[in-house]
Image (cartoon, grey):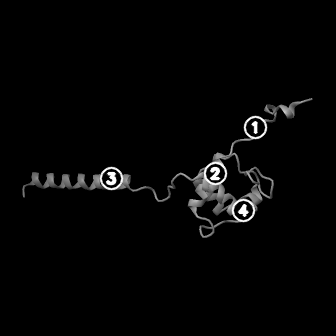
Amino acid sequence: MKFSNLLLLTTVLAMLASSTAAIAQTAAPSQSALPPGNAENGKKLFVTYLCWQCHGSMGRAGGAAPAITPSTRSAEDLIKYVRKPRGNMPPYTSKSISDRELADIAAYLRTIPKDPDAKSIPLLNQQ
């Protein structure tokens, strides 16, 4: 085999290998990436897992734990916190609540709006 043919064959094989690796990386989704959560299911899970007992019915506190709404927390952040919480909250393993369920709860918490400013409520501003 001529040197130029060998060089051409080596170049083609190298290009093929690198393009196959690039396609595989873009085609395979990240294992840690979660699909967007389902807020409706998250609302049910918030009740089912008794989150409301400590965080209040709308996540605005009222129990033994702080307010967790309004929330901009991503599912990944909520999962990390629930798995290794600070303070008095017990850790919840993936055996007790799945990442998918926590992603749904995170989606639900993001749907709860901020409380209105007291100045915007006429009844509270009467003298």
Question: Could you say which quadrant of the image residue 126 lies in?
Answer: top right
Residue at 63% over, 49% down? 73
What residue did someone put label 3 on?
23
Question: Element type at marker 1?
Answer: loop
Q: CA distance from mark 4 to mark 3?
A: 44 Å
| Residue 36 place in picture, x, y as percent | 53, 51
Give the amino acid type for the residue marked by disc 4 in the picture.
Leu
Q: Residues within 10 Å of mark 1 (few under 14, many from 20)?
A: few
Question: Could you say which quadrant of the image residue 105 lies in?
Answer: bottom right
Question: Element type at marker 3?
Answer: helix
Q: How many marks?
A: 4
What residue did someone put label 4 on?
50
Question: Element type at marker 2?
Answer: helix
Q: As displayed, is residue 63 above or below residue 114?
A: below
Q: CA distance from mark 1 to mark 3?
A: 49 Å
Identify the mark nearer the N-term, 3 or 2: 3
